[in-house]
Image: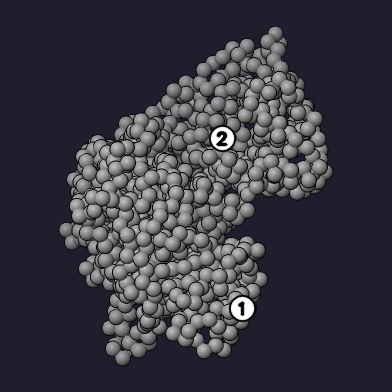
């Protein structure tokens, strides 16, 4: 029920044309009018003067408001009309950097900006949800005199670290005083991997384990759909013998079979992350995703820290990803599961870093810990910390300072009294005891 | 304690430059205006602006960190207060004056600093704070500017346009700084360019608007400065038609414009005892009892103690009906030398609601105007007042007549024996002797003390004030003069009354009465200002008749003497213009025949043969006394009657059923009855009641005019607006709550379709909607599985229906083999009803949010 109310509220809010400033303006106008009316029955010698001022102020404000409104309407109608003719007038695309998706790009081919007005955007995801509204016109590159072309990168504020289906979005055309706002919906389905926020984690010192010299040869190409797999464009220097003439005959492009991958590093770090959480799978609740986010964030920090040291990392999870998937993609797309144990993924030979969390089975951990060397590092990530709050210790601080912004304030209170919390803490406590009892190198996060 | 930043330094700098600085600039101007208005703040505009600025800037910087507002603001205010208090306490060592000066200085600093701090917080933290500040500054500027005078179009525009510009600028800039990446250099370049463009555009628009309104503004400025036709006397105002009435407040202004049109004439039955020398009386409309120190305005006050103002709703009274207010007599507190005076007022230009009579009036009765005079006078009324025998228009200007001179002497002698005011009600004394404590009124108090140094009685003190205004210099020229254009005082902040009393020494009645009032009150004499018309006896021909021209509108002082009540004292020095008639006084209207009785009511039947009217009586007045008429209808004999509508004579047949009429009889033979009973009176008079005049108010027009008046005079009150809004909102809310039920009914209705495809669609829609509304939604399983689940729960056959629905959907040709599903639907409705209890169903079906979700989620 509260959810539906909030959806309704956000829907109505986004579609409502009048903004708060409009009501402010009405209020001020009303006050001015009231001033003019109340002074009428007075002998107040200055009444005509007040009337003159009221009239001048009202007319001036009115003329600016009308100008604003007209420009917003013109801009809206133009955008609607152009988009009706050209479906791709408003287009979203994904911005990638270092193989990770960092932001969304929006490109509007033709657009008239409202006079001194603003263009805001909110994205629609998972059918009904909308992201918060972002000011597009402040950071966009806008070219053109009257009919403009807009390019901007849209920072995406999505709640969880996971893959999202973005359906499209709403462009809000606002006037200069934020009096009116017209919403223009557009569709552009995209799949977006919402990344973790990079946090400079403390340096983790670890000596990578010597791994096998790994040479991935293309011994035999797997039969997969699409003939362009395992190919790349022909560059000068490539072996001409590798050109696939069959493709050239078809597409008139020179492609070569991908060269053999030779792992240049002698050493490689293996990070194992377990998403085994039978309790969360059998008891679905609102907390799951927040706990998962926390876990993903911590793993991502570990991976990033390692990457900063220019170490080749291989992240191994229990999610059944392809071996060459980008580590961060692996993290983002992971989910809680209840089938694969930690011992099923950790290979003794290659073990370096093992990430466990509060839901891993004790027996399972015991088996794994028995097989690792003291040089290996175990990260125990207490997911219950996801709901730990930065509480002020000092009453004075509490009175004087604003608490840091908290995204799940309400959830936190519920978590405090939930059974899930009890279960999590119980399990975490057991694991902590277990780790302390063992002679291993472990860090608690 | 580590305090983190809440807002980046660059943004803080932007707020300081783009929001804080312009606010300071505008404030500098406002403080200048304020300083010129209040003497206490004089010549410190720059310092004050600095105090405010320090508050504003510190606050913007301070709240860039994660500090809470309320707690920190409370600490700030408390600290400032404590410092102020300690300054008071420990400052005594510095000498009394220095301590006072420092603590006042600190107080000003603290107030401005506090306001600056608050504004800084609004700009820094509150999303719409800038709009709030801009709006309030605009409003306060409107209120402030009107207090400064001496404008022309250019100075007005140059003063006011920047303020409008500031309002729009602040709103625009604060909005432009929301949700932007301030670290982006490209943004700043664009922002500044945009800002300049915006300023240019809005300046052009505002200047264009002001040029567009130029003529109007010029006219308004002229009006405000007394060059126009309005504001004739500071006390008189005129409506659109030119009718004269009095205002609720009187302000002394720089110029006074008078005209000499005839406003009304009056017959006052008051002569000096045992003579035929007319004793004119001032006609009072209202009293100004309250003095507003801030605006130097004398105001009416409905809460004045011992309210003896009689304010009948003259415009709404029907002819010959009467109104009496006996509470007024009790409050007048006059027992000695009291006399009842009757006056008749023939109104030419007075507002229909304006009531004038000598103090203290208690009775009014609208009367007819003789038809020969109906062109000149539009209405008339009779009034009765209890007037002290000591009261007279002759106070300042002594007429050469020995009767009058004797009267004066005798009057003063009587008043010298009046008891002390100490016996009076303390509330009464406190209210009517209120004297402003502000420092700029001290000279007036001093003057009052000087003037009455050896005077003991109230009357001698009053006479001393009179003598002060009548005093002559060594060249035998009067020191105080009368003028309609007293001019603006040199210093804008100087009190106008001080200026009048000590420097210019010239003014019109508002100045004299205002100054007298303050002088009297400074001495603790209960007094008030009366406004109305001064009466001048110009005619020897028609004794007791007085003509009143617009320039005779006047303000004077009434002084309270225990046991004698309020007595008029006019201290305005001679204004010869007002006493000389603009034109010779005309012929007085024929004295109205006194009515024996008047009856009003609705016409229920007319008989044009007998000339009889049957009415349902509403009001019956016999010789000034009102009787409650019986419920039965009564016949009026109109055989000799003049039938009048407005001023036009009509025929009998023009009277129609439903009209409101007033029948009046003037026959003296009906004068002598002394019954207290309505029916006895009627039976003694005669039935049918003979009437001489019948005044007709047609049914339709009465309703229309009433409506129009209501529309004109009474703007919708807040309560009625609130009521309307709440009714509308209530209805909308109920409609909203009923929406799911309406949709269900509509979907059910649609299942009646005999076309098989639309029937199946409708049934599916209905079931789907019903299930959704009762919170049985399907997100995870296939629709068929879902329908099976439903069947399990309710023992219905939804799965079967769904299978055939899907079959039909993908193969419309099958429609031939399918039958209508009414049975399934009825079965489904009854079975789900059994399982879902009424309360549960009701709760589900008054939830429009689920419905909304249904349409948004499935609609997409």
Callout 1–callout 2 Cβ contact below 8 Å = no
Nearer to the camera, B517 or B580: B517
Q: In this view, does A289 lie above or below B832?
A: below
x and y percent of residue A17 in the render?
44, 42
* CA distance separating discs 1 and 2: 94 Å
x and y percent of residue B828 in the render?
78, 37
* Residue at disc 2, secondary structure: helix
* Residue at disc 1, secondary structure: helix
Q: Taking B551 as reference, is A348 left or right?
A: right
Q: Nearer the viewer, mark 1 or mark 2?
A: 1
Residue tagged by mark 2? B316
Chain at numbered mark 1: A
Q: Taking A65 as reference, is B702 left or right?
A: right
How packed is label 1: few (under 14 Cα within 10 Å), some, or many (20 or more)? some
x and y percent of residue B87 in the render?
35, 84
Task: In the displayed orientation, state which residue is furthest to the left.
Answer: B475
**Residue drawn at x 28%, y 61% as measured from the top left:** B182
* Residue A229 seen from this side: yes
Residue tagged by mark 1? A362
**Residue drawn at x 45%, y 82% as measured from the top left:** A376
Image quarter for residue A350? bottom left
Nearer to the camera, B621 or B732: B732
How packed is label 2: few (under 14 Cα within 10 Å), some, or many (20 or more)? few
Chain at numbered mark 2: B
Task: In the displayed orientation, state which residue is furthest to the bottom.
Answer: B93
* Count of labels in the image: 2
Q: Find residue B404 and name its label.
A: none
**Residue drawn at x 79%, y 39% as measured from the top left:** B796
């Amino acid at each position: 029920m509260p959810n539906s109310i909030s959806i309704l509220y956000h829907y109505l809010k986004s579609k409502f044309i009048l903004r708060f400033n409009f009501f402010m303006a009405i209020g001020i106008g009303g006050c001015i009018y009231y001033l003019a009316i109340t002074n009428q029955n007075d002998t107040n010698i200055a009444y005509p003067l007040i009337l003159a001022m009221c009239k001048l102020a009202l007319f001036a404000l009115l003329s600016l408001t009308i100008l604003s409104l007209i420009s917003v309407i013109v801009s809206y109608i133009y955008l609607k009309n152009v988009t009706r003719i050209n479906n791709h007038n408003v287009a979203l695309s994904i911005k990638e950097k270092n193989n990770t998706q960092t932001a969304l790009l929006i490109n509007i081919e033709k657009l008239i900006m409202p006079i001194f007005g603003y263009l805001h955007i909110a994205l629609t995801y998972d059918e009904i949800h909308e992201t918060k509204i972002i000011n597009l016109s402040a950071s966009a590159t806008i070219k053109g005199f009257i009919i403009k072309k807009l390019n901007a990168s849209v920072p995406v504020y999505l709640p969880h670290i996971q893959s999202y289906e973005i359906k499209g979005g709403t462009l809000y055309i606002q006037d200069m005083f934020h009096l009116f706002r017209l919403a223009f919906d557009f569709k552009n389905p995209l799949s977006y991997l919402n990344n973790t926020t990079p946090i400079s984690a403390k340096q983790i010192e670890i000596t990578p384990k010597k791994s096998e010299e790994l040479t991935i040869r293309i011994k035999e190409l797997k039969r997969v759909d699409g003939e362009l797999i395992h190919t790349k464009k022909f560059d000068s220097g490539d072996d001409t013998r590798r050109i696939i003439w069959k493709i050239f005959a078809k597409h008139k492009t020179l492609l070569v079979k991908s060269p053999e991958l030779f792992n240049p590093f002698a050493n490689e770090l293996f990070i194992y992350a377990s998403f085994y959480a039978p309790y969360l799978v059998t008891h679905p609740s609102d907390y799951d995703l927040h706990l998962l986010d926390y876990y993903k964030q911590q793993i991502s920090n570990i991976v990033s820290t390692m990457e900063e040291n220019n170490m080749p990392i291989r992240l191994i999870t229990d999610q059944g990803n392809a071996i060459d998937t980008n580590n961060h993609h692996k993290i983002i797309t992971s989910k809680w599961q209840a089938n694969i144990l930690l011992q099923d993924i950790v290979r003794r030979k290659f073990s370096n870093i093992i990430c466990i969390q509060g839901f891993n089975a004790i027996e399972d951990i015991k088996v794994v810990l028995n097989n690792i060397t003291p040089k290996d590092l175990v990260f125990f990530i207490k997911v219950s910390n996801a709901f730990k709050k930065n509480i002020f210790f000092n009453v004075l601080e509490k009175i004087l300072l604003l608490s840091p912004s908290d995204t799940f304030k309400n959830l936190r209170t519920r978590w405090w009294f939930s059974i899930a919390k009890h279960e999590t803490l119980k399990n975490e406590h057991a694991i902590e005891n277990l780790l302390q009892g063992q002679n291993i190198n472990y860090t608690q996060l | 304690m580590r305090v983190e930043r809440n807002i980046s330094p660059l943004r803080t700098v932007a707020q300081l430059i783009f929001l804080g600085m312009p606010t300071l600039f505008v404030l500098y101007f406002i403080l200048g205006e304020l300083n010129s208005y209040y003497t206490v703040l004089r010549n410190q505009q720059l310092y004050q602006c600095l105090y405010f600025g320090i508050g504003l800037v510190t606050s913007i910087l301070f709240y860039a960190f994660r500090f809470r507002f309320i707690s920190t603001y409370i600490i700030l205010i408390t600290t400032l207060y404590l410092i102020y208090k300690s300054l008071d306490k420990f400052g005594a060592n510095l000498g009394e004056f220095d301590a006072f000066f420092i603590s006042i200085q600190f107080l000003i600093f603290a107030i401005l600093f506090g306001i600056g701090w608050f504004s800084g917080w609004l700009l820094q933290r509150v999303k719409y704070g800038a709009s709030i500040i801009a709006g309030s500054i605009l409003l306060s500027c409107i209120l402030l500017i009107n207090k400064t005078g001496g404008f022309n179009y250019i100075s007005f525009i140059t003063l006011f346009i920047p303020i409008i510009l500031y309002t729009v600028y602040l709103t625009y800039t604060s909005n432009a700084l929301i949700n932007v990446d301030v670290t982006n250099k490209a943004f700043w370049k664009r922002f500044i360019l945009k800002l300049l463009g915006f300023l240019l555009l809005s300046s052009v628009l505002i200047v264009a608007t002001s040029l567009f309104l130029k003529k109007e503004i010029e006219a308004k400025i002229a009006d405000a400065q007394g060059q126009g036709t309005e504001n004739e006397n500071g006390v008189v105002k005129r409506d659109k038609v030119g009718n004269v009435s009095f205002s609720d407040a009187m302000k002394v202004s720089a110029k006074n414009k008078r005209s000499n049109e005839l406003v009304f004439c009056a017959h006052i039955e008051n002569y000096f005892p045992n003579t035929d020398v007319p004793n004119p009386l001032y006609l009072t409309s209202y009293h100004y009892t309250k003095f507003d120190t801030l605006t130097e305005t004398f105001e009416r006050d409905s809460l004045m103690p011992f309210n003896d103002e009689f304010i009948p709703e003259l415009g709404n009274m029907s002819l010959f009906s009467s109104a009496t207010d006996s509470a007024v007599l009790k409050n007048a507190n006059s027992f000695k030398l009291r006399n009842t005076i009757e006056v008749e007022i023939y109104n030419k230009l007075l507002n229909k609601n304006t009531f004038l009579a000598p103090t203290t009036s208690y009775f009014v009765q609208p009367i007819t105007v003789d038809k020969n005079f109906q062109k000149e006078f539009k209405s008339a009324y009779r009034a009765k007042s209890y007037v002290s025998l000591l009261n007279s228009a002759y106070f300042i200007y002594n007429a050469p007549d020995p009767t009058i001179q004797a009267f004066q002497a005798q009057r003063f002698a009587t008043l010298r024996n009046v008891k002390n005011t100490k016996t009076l009600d303390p509330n009464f004394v406190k209210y009517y002797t209120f004297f402003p404590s502000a420092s700029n009124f001290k000279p007036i108090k001093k003057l009052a003390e000087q003037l009455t140094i050896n005077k003991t009685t109230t009357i001698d003190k009053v006479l001393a004030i009179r003598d002060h205004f009548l005093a002559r210099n060594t060249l035998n020229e009067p020191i105080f003069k009368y003028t309609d254009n007293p001019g603006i005082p040199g210093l804008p902040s100087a009190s106008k009354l001080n200026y009048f009393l000590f420097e210019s020494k010239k003014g019109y009645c508002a100045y004299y009465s205002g100054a007298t009032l303050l002088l009297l009150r400074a001495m603790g004499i209960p007094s008030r200002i009366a406004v109305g018309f001064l009466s001048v006896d110009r005619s020897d021909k028609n004794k007791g008749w007085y003509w009143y021209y617009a320039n005779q509108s006047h303000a004077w002082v009434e002084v309270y003497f225990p046991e004698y009540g309020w007595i008029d004292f006019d201290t305005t020095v001679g204004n010869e213009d007002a006493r000389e008639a603009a034109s010779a006084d005309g012929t007085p209207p024929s004295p109205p025949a006194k009515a024996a009785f008047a009856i009003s009511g609705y016409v229920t039947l007319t008989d044009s043969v007998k000339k009889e009217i049957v009415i349902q009586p509403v009001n019956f007045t016999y010789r000034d006394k009102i009787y409650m008429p019986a419920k039965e209808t009564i016949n009026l004999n109109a055989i000799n009657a003049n039938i009048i509508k407005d001023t036009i004579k009509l025929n009998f047949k023009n009277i129609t059923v439903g009209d409101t009429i007033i029948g009046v009889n003037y026959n003296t033979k009906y004068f002598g009855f002394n019954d207290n009973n309505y029916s006895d009176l009627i039976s003694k008079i005669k039935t049918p009641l003979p009437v001489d005049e019948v005044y007709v108010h047609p049914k339709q027009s009465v309703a229309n005019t009433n409506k129009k008046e209501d529309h004109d005079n009474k703007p919708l009150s807040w309560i009625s607006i609130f009521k309307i809004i709440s009714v509308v909102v209530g209805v909308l809310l109920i409609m909203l709550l009923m929406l799911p039920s309406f949709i269900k009914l509509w979907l059910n209705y649609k299942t009646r379709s005999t076309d098989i495809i639309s029937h199946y669609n409708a049934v599916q829609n209905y079931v789907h909607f019903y299930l959704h509304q009762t919170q049985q939604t399907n997100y995870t399983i296939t629709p068929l599985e879902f329908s099976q689940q439903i069947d399990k729960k309710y023992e219905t056959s939804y799965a079967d229906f769904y299978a055939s629905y899907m079959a039909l959907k993908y193969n419309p040709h099958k429609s031939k083999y399918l039958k209508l599903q009414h049975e399934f639907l009825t079965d489904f409705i009854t079975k789900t009803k059994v399982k879902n209890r009424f309360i549960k169903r009701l709760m589900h079906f008054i939830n429009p949010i689920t419905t909304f979700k249904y349409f948004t989620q499935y609609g997409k």
